[in-house]
Every structure is written in structure tokens, then in C-alpha cells.
Image: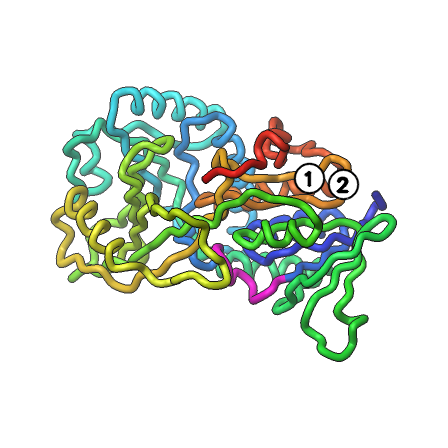
Amino acid sequence: MTASPHVVVIGAGTLGMCTALDLVEQGARVTVLEAQSIASGSSGRSVGVVGSQFTDPFEIMLRVHSLRRFRQWEGEGLAFNHIGYLRLARTPAQMELFARSVEIQAEAGLRSRLVRANELRELVPHINPDGLEGGLFGPDNGFLDPHEMCNLLAQMVRAKGGEIRQYRKLLGVQRRPGGYALETDGDPIDRERRLIDCDVVVNAGGAWAPRVAALFGQRLHIWPERHEAVAIHLDEPLRYTMPMVMDLVNGEGSGLNFRHEKPGELIAEIHKVKSAAPEDPDNYNDQCEEQSKVDLAELLLERVPDLPGARLGRGWAGLYPVTADHRPFVGPIDASEPTLITAAGAGGYGIQLAPVIGQIAADWVLHGAPVSVPGSRSLAPSAERNVPGH
């Protein structure tokens, strides 16, 4: 590998832009190819939550790396709304996991605390604590606007000499000694302008990543899973800021989550969306289905029954790129082709993991291994992990 390789990053969502920034900061020549516009895929439809309230030490460690970058970008203009993150527990066993999480986070320099059931209303006065043991609360967690984040990172990439080509779809791939010749659309007359020579490719195509992999003759098992979100309008603003509230612990719970969006408006999402077939990212219903609104209303009435004049507003759908084990793919699919790196499949955690995924992907490109994040080689899309999940 040359000291400053030309790397093409495919996809200008959060994973692609974080990877591009990490690479260009370390001296690589970077071109980002985006079939549509910046953050036009899953990133732009995300509710943008960034949290560290997890029970697995590795998952927490990954977020420590991400949060370090988010703090840096806040200093450069990224708006981060520190409203706090409350994960609910339904069983004593979950509370025991949460107690350990508090210890792990404290060792990593993150603030969090246990909240007993009778204390939940101190954080969320409208919550119904029935059936709950308590929760895990991180006061420094919050949310951001992923579209704003991607565009800020794009400015930073350009300022450091990187190039971002929007509305440039990858059409074909030719392998050449030491790299690739990529054919894109965009210029109907000059074929030379449609060809890009590069040394390394990073596939950060999100829900489209399997199609990108197929152009290289590789098979990538990522399932585009449909998820929906809805705005909740209130008759009057709450007298407190609603933190992010999540009813899901290691796959157990209703999947309901909701948070403050702006005065008089909340955002809610249902995590359990059933689909017998993968969604087509080029042709799926991007509006919230009526049955989903009915299901959401029932869950909200159970958990926050007395919100003042709450009514459901606009809804939308987005795609979670999901792997079989629900952990992201970061690394080469084929060890014999180390110049083709995958950075995709982060599911519903793409926003909060994007900075560390970008860091790991840049490691693979520049060092041939993930040298800066302990244990992250386990995220490579190995034959054991890169399997169908549905």
C-alpha cells in the first residue's frame, strides 16, 4: 500500500462520511461516490439517537470511541442535544445487567446511574412505571440531526482535499494491478470522466451495500429491515425535556422508544417491524403504515397515558441494514482482497457507531488491520458472520 492511497468510499451516509474523514485526516486521497445526495439513504431517515446505555462491555467500548469524536465535532459546529437516555428494565436480572453497565461506563469515563421504578417519574413525570423494575440513565447522551452531521463532515472532508461526487452511481468494476477502475454514471458523453482509478474501495452503501458487493463478485448478507417513526404533537410544551426513553434490552421489550424533538413535539419509533422479505431500497413505501400508528398509539397509552393532548402526526419509514448477528461488518469479506473493505450493516445503531466504524475501516485501509480499537477484528465480515440472517 502506498503512503497516500487513493480510496473511493461508496456511500455518503454517516458511515461513509466518517470513514472518508478519518482517511483524509491521515493523508489518504479520498473520493466519495454517492448515487443520490448526501445522507439520502438510511442516515437521513434516522431519529439520530446517540447513547451508551448498553450491557455488553465491547458495545460500550465502541461508543466510547464514537463519543470522543462527537465531542470533537461539537467543538467544530455539530449540534448535539444532550437530553439524556433512559433504557427501561422489566426484570431484576436486567437491573443487575444495568448495575454492571454503570460500573463499566464509569471505568470508561462515562456518566450513568441506576434509576429505581419509584424514581422514574423524577426523570419522566408522565411515565407509567407499572411492570417496570427501573432503568439505566445516561445524562450526557442525546440526539443529533444526521443530515446536518453528514453535511458538516462533507465540509471537513472537502476542506482537507477530499472530493465528494453526488448523483454518481457505481455501474461496473474492473480490477487492475494494484487497484480498480470504477465506472460511474453522470457524464453521458465523456466516458473517461465516468471512470475512476483507485487503489482501495470502501463499501459503505448501507441498504445498497449488497448490490455494491455484487459488482465486485462478492456476496454480502445484509437485510434491509423496515422501521417506522412518527411525530407526536402535544397541546402544550412539556415543563421538562423528555429524555430518550427505550423499552428494549438485548432484544427483550416492546421496542417502543420516544424522545423530545422540540417544544410541543416528540418523536417515537417502533423497533419491531415484521417483514417476510427484504425491502427494496430503491422501491419501498417510505411512509408510515396506518397499522403501525395504531400499534404505536397502544404502546404509548400504556407507557405515557397522560401526555397533554397527544396526537400522532407525520410518519415515515427507513431501512436498517441488518446482519445475521446484529453487529456491523467492518473489514474485508475476502482476506485475499484486502483492498476491498466493507463498512456496513450497523442496523439501528449506524449513527452512534459511525465514528468508530469509520476509524476501524480507515485502519483496515491504511494498516491492513484494525489497530486502534481493541477487539474490533471480530467485526470483520468473516465466513462465519457473513451468512443469511432471515
Q: Main secondary structure of the magenta part?
A: loop
Residue at 64% from the left image edge and 30% from the top image edge:
377
Residue drawn 19% across and 29% down?
A: 117
Residue, disc 2: 337
**Residue type of the residue flagged with mark 1:** Pro
Residue 155 or residue 132, whichever sits in front:
132
Q: What colour scheme was applied to this rendering of the protein?
A: rainbow
Q: Residue at x 76, y 41 (%)?
A: 337
Q: Are marks 1 and 2 in contact (CB under 8 Å)?
A: yes
Q: Locate residue 108 relative to residue 139 in the image: left or right.
A: right
- Density class for disc 1 (Cα within 10 Å; few <14, some 14-19, many ≥20) is many
Would you identify the image quadrant in which residue 314 lies? bottom left
297 w.r.t. 377: above or below: below
User: Which residue occupies the foreground of this view, 294 or 125?
Assistant: 294
Q: Residue at x 42, y 54 (%)?
A: 46
Q: Is residue 304 left or right of residue 381?
A: left
- Residue 189 position, x and y percent, is 76, 79
What type is the residue that disc 2 sits on?
Answer: Glu
Whether residue 123 is visible: yes
Q: Name the residue carrying label 1.
A: 332
In the picture, measured across the screen, residue 149 lies left or right of residue 154, that is left
The image position of residue 107, as x and y in percent, is 48, 24
In this orientation, which residue lies closer to the viewer: 250 or 263? Answer: 250
> Is 96 rendered above or below residue 296?
above
Asked where in the image residue 174 lies, by quadrant, the reply is bottom right
The answer to whether residue 35 is magenta is yes
Say what secondary structure mark 2 lies in: loop
Marked residue nearer the N-terminal end (1 or 2): 1
Q: Position of residue 223 (x, y in %)?
A: 49, 46
Which element carries disc 1, helix, strand or loop?
Answer: strand
Mark 1 vs mark 2, CA separation in Å = 7 Å
Magenta span of residues: 34-42
